[in-house]
C-alpha cells in the first residue's frame, strides 16, 4: 500500500519561495563569474604575422623617458611646470618619488591644478615626440572642510569655531583639497591584440601608428584614480604655498588593468549620480587596501552574505507580520534594538558617512520601529493632524513573560547604566567634539557598540525561566547567525572602527549561548511554527491500493 501525500498551499508556497531564492542566488553567482571572466580575459591574436594583429611597441626595447608636468589648465594653456623627469626610465622597475609642488596663485584661491604624465622617447621633448603617450589627471578636488572640534567643557577655540561656521567663511561651501598621491601604471606584458576583438575598455587607452603593413600600439599608460583616498587629502588655503606629492610607479597586467578600468568607471558613475568623493571612498578602500586574490574571496563571501541577508529579512518580516502574541519574547530587547539602530543611524548621519552605509541603516531603523509597534500592540489613530496612540492589553502568559523581562532588565541596569554614564562623562572631559549634539550621539553609539550585546541577555533570561525557545524566529535567527560569522571575515578585510570590529566578535558569544539553549530546551514539534505548519502533524492525504 502506498500513501499519497498532499501538501497544504502554505507548505507548497514556502517550499517554492525557498527554491526560487536559491535558484536566483545560483544564477547570480554564475552570471557574476562569467562577467568577471570576460573582464580579466582578453583574446590574443592567433597569428602574430596577420594584418589584423596589433603588436606592442615595447617589443623593440626602446629607450623611454617619464616626464610629469603641472598646469592650471587641462590643455596646458597658460604654461606648464616640470616636476619630475626619469631620463633612464626602466619600465619593469617600480619606484616612489617625493616632490614638493609650489602652488600657483590661482590654485591657492580655490582653483584647480592638473598633472600631465608623458612616456616618450629618451632625449626627445614630449611636446615634439610623435610617439609619446600621455594622461591628464586632476591633482585637486573639492570637498567641504572638516568642521572644527572643541572641548565642550573648557570651551577652547569656541569663538574661532563660530567664526569659521559663519556664512561665506568657507565652512559652508566646498574648498579645494590637494591629492598627495599620484599612482602610475604601465602594462609590461607584450600582448598582441586582435583588431577584430579589441576590448572597448582598453580602446580609449590605445594609441596606434602604422609601421609598414603592421599596426603597432604604444605603451598602455594608466593613472590609478582609485588610490586617491580622502585620508590623503590636504586642504588648500590662501597661505598654502608648497605641498608634498608622492609619485609612485609600478607595472600592471592587462587583466588587472581592465578590471581597474571597470572599477574606476563604476566609481565615476556613482559620483555622477550625486555621490561625493567621501561617499565612494569606502569602495576605493576595498579595492586599494586589499590583495586581489583576497578581494576575490571577499566577492565570493559577499554573495553568501547577500543571500543570508535576503533570507533573514524575508523570514524576519514574515515572522513579525504574523506575530499575534509576545509570549516568550523580550519586549525590552525589541525596544533596545530599535533604539540602538536609530542611534547608529544618527551617528552615521552626524559623521557624514557614505550613502552606501547610511541608506541601509535608515531602512533598518524603520523596520525596527515597525517591530516595536507590533510588540507593544500600538495603534495610531489620527484626529486631524494630531495622532492618538492606543496600546493593546496583554494576556496572562504575556504578563508572565513581561515579569521575567523586567527582572532581567533590573539586574542588567546595575551594570549597564554606570558604565554608559561613566564613559559619557570621560568623553566630555577629555575628547573634543563639534557640538553638544555630536557628544550625545557619540556617547550613545559608544554605549551601543560597547555594551549593546548585554541587551540580548534578557531574551536569554526569559528562555531560561520559560525553559523554552519555541517562541523565537529560528529561521531568521539562524540566517543572521551565519551572517554574523561572515561579518567576522569582513572584520579582517574591510577597514572599520575598532569598536565595530569588536562588536562583530562579541555577538558570536551570544549566538553560541542561544544555540546551547536550543539544544537544552528542545522545540515541541507538535506546536505550530510561525508559518502555521506543524512538523508532527500527519499530512492529509488519500491512500489507495495499487
Image (cartoon, rainbow, N blue to C red):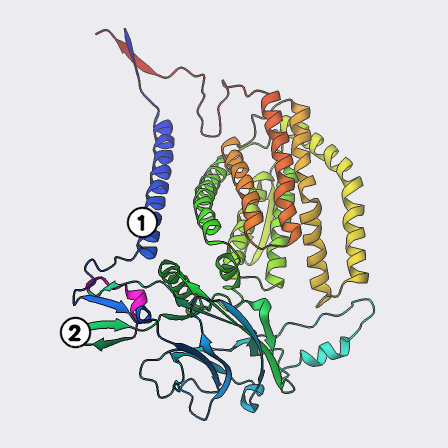
Q: Residues within 10 Å of mark 1 (few under 14, many from 20)?
A: few
Q: Is residue 442 left or right of residue 418?
A: left
Mark number, residue 34: 1
Where disc 1 sits, the SS reads helix
Quickly name the residue at label 2: 213
> What's the magenta region?
196-207
Q: Taking the image as drawn, is residue 370 in sight?
A: no
Please say if 222 is above or below 338: below
Please say if 525 is above or below 355: above
Q: Is residue 231 left or right of residue 531?
A: right
> Residue most toward the bottom?
78
Please say if 532 is above or below 270: above
**Residue for point 31% across, 68% down:** 59
Where disc 2 sits, the SS reads loop
**Residue for point 35% across, 61% down:** 254
In reply to whether residue 393 is colored magenta, the answer given is: no
Disc 2/disc 1 C-alpha distance (Å) = 36 Å
Where is residue 242 drawn, in percent x and y?
A: 62, 84
Where is residue 256 drawn, in percent x and y?
A: 39, 59
Q: Are marks 2 and 1 in contact (CB under 8 Å)?
A: no
Where is residue 45 drawn, in percent x and y?
A: 22, 60
Hey, which quadrant is residue 307 in on the image? top left
Where is residue 81 drawn, in percent x and y?
A: 50, 88
Please say if 536 is above or below 124: above
Of the numbered discs 2 and 1, the one sitting upstream in the chain is 1
Instruction: Tell which of 49 and 496 is nearer to you.
Output: 49
In reply to whether residue 197 is colored magenta, the answer given is: yes
Quadrant for the C terminus in the image: top left
**Front disc: 2 or 1:** 2
Quadrant for the N terminus in the image: top left
Amino acid at each position: 500500500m502506498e500513501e499519497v501525500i498532499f501538501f497544504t498551499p502554505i507548505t507548497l508556497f514556502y517550499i517554492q519561495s525557498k527554491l526560487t531564492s536559491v535558484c536566483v542566488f545560483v544564477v547570480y553567482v554564475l552570471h557574476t563569474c562569467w562577467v568577471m571572466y570576460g573582464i580579466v580575459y582578453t583574446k590574443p591574436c592567433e597569428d602574430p604575422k596577420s594584418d589584423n594583429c596589433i603588436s606592442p611597441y615595447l617589443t623593440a626595447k626602446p629607450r623611454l623617458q617619464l616626464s610629469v608636468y603641472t598646469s592650471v589648465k587641462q590643455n596646458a594653456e597658460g604654461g606648464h611646470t616640470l616636476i619630475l623627469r626619469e631620463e633612464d626610465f626602466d619600465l619593469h622597475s617600480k619606484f616612489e618619488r617625493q616632490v614638493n609642488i609650489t602652488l600657483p596663485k590661482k590654485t591657492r584661491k580655490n582653483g584647480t591644478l592638473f598633472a600631465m604624465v608623458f612616456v616618450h622617447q629618451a632625449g626627445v621633448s614630449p611636446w615634439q615626440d610623435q610617439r609619446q603617450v600621455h594622461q591628464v589627471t586632476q591633482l585637486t578636488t573639492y570637498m567641504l572642510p572638516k568642521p572644527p572640534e572643541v572641548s565642550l567643557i573648557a570651551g577652547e577655540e569656541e569663538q574661532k569655531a563660530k567664526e569659521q561656521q559663519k556664512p561665506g567663511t568657507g565652512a559652508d561651501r566646498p574648498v579645494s583639497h590637494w591629492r598627495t598621491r599620484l599612482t602610475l601604471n604601465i602594462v609590461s606584458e607584450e600582448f598582441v591584440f586582435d583588431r577584430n576583438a579589441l576590448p572597448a575598455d582598453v580602446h580609449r587607452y590605445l594609441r596606434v601608428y602604422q609601421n609598414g603593413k603592421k599596426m603597432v600600439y604604444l605603451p598602455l599608460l594608466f593613472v590609478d584614480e582609485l588610490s586617491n583616498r580622502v585620508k590623503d587629502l590636504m586642504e588648500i588655503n590662501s597661505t598654502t604655498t608648497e605641498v608634498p606629492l608622492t609619485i609612485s610607479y609600478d607595472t600592471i597586467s592587462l587583466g588587472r588593468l581592465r578590471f581597474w578600468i571597470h572599477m574606476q568607471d563604476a566609481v565615476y558613475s556613482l559620483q555622477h549620480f550625486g555621490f561625493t568623493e567621501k561617499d565612494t571612498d569606502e569602495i576605493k578602500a576595498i579595492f586599494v587596501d586589499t590583495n586581489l586574490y583576497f578581494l576575490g574571496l571577499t566577492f565570493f563571501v559577499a554573495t553568501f552574505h547577500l543571500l543570508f541577508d535576503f533570507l533573514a529579512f524575508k523570514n524576519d518580516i514574515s515572522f513579525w507580520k504574523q506575530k499575534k502574541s509576545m509570549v516568550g519574547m523580550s519586549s525590552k530587547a525589541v525596544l533596545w534594538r530599535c533604539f540602538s539602530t536609530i542611534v547608529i543611524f544618527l551617528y552615521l548621519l552626524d559623521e557624514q558617512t557614505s550613502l552606501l552605509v547610511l541608506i541601509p541603516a535608515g531602512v533598518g531603523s524603520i523596520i525596527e520601529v515597525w517591530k516595536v509597534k507590533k510588540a507593544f500592540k500600538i495603534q495610531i489613530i489620527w484626529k486631524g493632524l494630531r495622532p492618538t496612540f492606543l496600546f493593546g492589553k496583554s494576556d496572562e502568559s504575556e504578563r508572565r513573560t513581561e515579569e521575567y523581562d523586567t527582572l532581567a532588565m533590573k539586574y542588567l541596569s546595575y551594570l549597564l547604566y554606570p558604565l554608559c554614564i561613566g564613559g559619557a562623562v570621560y568623553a566630555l572631559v577629555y575628547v573634543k567634539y563639534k557640538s553638544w549634539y555630536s557628544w550625545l550621539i557619540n556617547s550613545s553609539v559608544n554605549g551601543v557598540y560597547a555594551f549593546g550585546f548585554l541587551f540580548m541577555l534578557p531574551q536569554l533570561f526569559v528562555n531560561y525561566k520559560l525553559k523554552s525557545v519555541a517562541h523565537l524566529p529560528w529561521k531568521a535567527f539562524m540566517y543572521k547567525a551565519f551572517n554574523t560569522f561572515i561579518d567576522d571575515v569582513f572584520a579582517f578585510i574591510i577597514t572599520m572602527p575598532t569598536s565595530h570590529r569588536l562588536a562583530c566578535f562579541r555577538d558570536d558569544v551570544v549566538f553560541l549561548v542561544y544555540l546551547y539553549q536550543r539544544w537544552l530546551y528542545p522545540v515541541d514539534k507538535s506546536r505550530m511554527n510561525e508559518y502555521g505548519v506543524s512538523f508532527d502533524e500527519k499530512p492529509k492525504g488519500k491512500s489507495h491500493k495499487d
